[in-house]
Image (cartoon, rainbow, N blue to C red):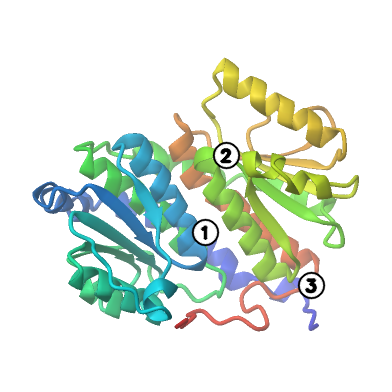
């Protein structure tokens, strides 16, 4: 495995993370592309939603799923492209919305599935970083991530843009149009204060297992943090719901396991939720003391590592902005291990799956 001079690697990924506040600002300043969707959605009596995505975009898809279910009460499923591309299934998608999320808009299986769904009666919305891509051209309505060209293989600014675009989409569907200035301001503030990320990286050992946990709106970031560390540091990392972790995987927890917990500010901590989470943490702490908090220190104990996240008025906004700290951690961790996070061996920017 090649290793690199830490002073010469990761500069592209770092610069693209630094662009996130500007990308969020562009999206916040383009409400027209989201408000234009409200008539499309109302006119077609949408009764169910499917989200079509792979990789990083699939993690953003989980965020959209939570947003639609909690704000609109509609059933949301995650598609299985292989049902069309391999098994040639016939779809019946009347009154169904398919939201296709893809940075490139080029993945063959996503395009084929979207085309089949459209012919089966679904309405298609694409969320891409290229309005000239096959997926965007096929869609009934195309949303632009406005992230500009992304060069580093590991998606950063496009993932943050996907999370924010999902929020803007669902709010427009709900006829909510806040100005989002606080989100942009929080991202700018966080970009200027990342010292706690580098401190946490110094304490983390690539040779010991890493498990990343989240719940609710922090679950997509748990999945994405695990993926980013896998991509850039070439190790196996699990990204799980805390609830799922307690249903079996915790049995593999050891004293050397490093447990990362995505904890955005203003988690919804009613008494029952807090009691359940406290119980889960007690079981985790009984086996491992190496706990890293991404977001807030509200539930941290002395000796545990805290990476300070976004200062936002609600959990959803904080989860969008906290993408900055998980991406910066992956970047600095790869650098620490002498690996190139800009262009990891064995990966390419666009993955064309069948």
Label 3 vs 2, first from the N-terminus: 2
Of residue 231 and residue 28, the one placed in the foreground of this image is 231
Q: Nearer the viewer, mark 3 or mark 1?
A: 3
Choose top left, top right, bottom left or bottom right for residue 26: bottom left
Reading the image, the residue beneath label 3 is: 338
Classify the position of the N terminus by image quarter: bottom right
Classify the position of the C terminus by image quarter: bottom left
As measured in the structure, the alpha-carbon distance from the residue carrying label 3 to the one carrying label 1 is: 21 Å
Q: Nearer the viewer, mark 1 or mark 2?
A: 2
As measured in the structure, the alpha-carbon distance from the residue carrying label 3 to the one carrying label 2 is: 32 Å
Residue drawn at (41%, 78%), measured in percent from left and top? Answer: 87
Reading the image, the residue beneath label 1 is: 18
Q: Is residue 84 above or below residue 69?
A: below
Secondary structure beneath dot 3 equals: loop
Q: Residues within 10 Å of mark 1 (few under 14, many from 20)?
A: some
Of residue 319 and residue 27, the one placed in the foreground of this image is 319
Residue drawn at (55%, 74%), measured in percent from left and top? Answer: 152
Q: Are marks 3 and 2 in contact (CB under 8 Å)?
A: no
Reading the image, the residue beneath label 2 is: 215
């Amino acid at each position: 495995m090649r290793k690199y001079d830490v002073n010469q690697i990761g500069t592209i990924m770092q610069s693209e993370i630094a662009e996130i506040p500007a990308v969020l600002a562009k999206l916040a300043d383009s409400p027209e592309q989201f408000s234009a969707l409200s008539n499309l959605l109302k006119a077609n009596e949408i009764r169910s939603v499917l989200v079509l995505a792979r990789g990083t975009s699939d993690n953003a898809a989980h965020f959209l799923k939570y947003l639609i279910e909690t704000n609109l009460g509609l059933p949301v499923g995650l598609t299985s492209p292989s049902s069309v591309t391999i098994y040639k299934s016939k779809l019946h998608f009347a009154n169904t919305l398919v939201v296709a999320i893809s940075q490139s808009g080029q993945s063959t299986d996503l395009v084929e599935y979207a085309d089949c769904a459209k012919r089966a009666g679904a309405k298609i919305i694409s969320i891409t970083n290229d309005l000239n891509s096959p997926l965007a051209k096929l869609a009934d309505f195309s949303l632009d991530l406005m992230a500009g060209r992304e060069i580093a293989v590991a998606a950063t600014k496009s993932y943050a843009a996907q999370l924010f675009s999902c929020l803007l989409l669902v709010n427009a569907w709900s006829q909510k149009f806040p100005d989002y200035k606080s989100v942009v301001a929080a991202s700018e503030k966080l970009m200027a204060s990342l010292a706690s990320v580098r401190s946490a990286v110094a304490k983390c050992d690539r040779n010991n297992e890493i498990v990343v946990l989240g719940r609710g709106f922090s679950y997509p970031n748990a999945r994405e943090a695990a993926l980013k560390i896998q991509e850039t540091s070439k190790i196996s990392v699990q990204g799980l719901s805390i609830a799922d972790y307690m249903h079996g995987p915790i049995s593999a927890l050891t004293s050397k396991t490093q447990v990362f917990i995505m904890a955005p500010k203003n988690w919804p901590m009613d008494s029952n939720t807090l009691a359940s989470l406290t119980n889960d943490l007690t079981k985790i702490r009984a086996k491992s003391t190496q706990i890293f908090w991404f977001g807030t220190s509200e539930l941290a104990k002395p000796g545990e590592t805290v990476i300070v996240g976004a200062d936002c008025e609600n959990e959803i906004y904080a989860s969008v902005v906290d993408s900055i700290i998980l991406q910066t951690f992956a970047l600095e961790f790869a650098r620490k291990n002498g690996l190139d996070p800009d262009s990891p061996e064995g990966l390419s920017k666009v993955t064309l799956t069948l």
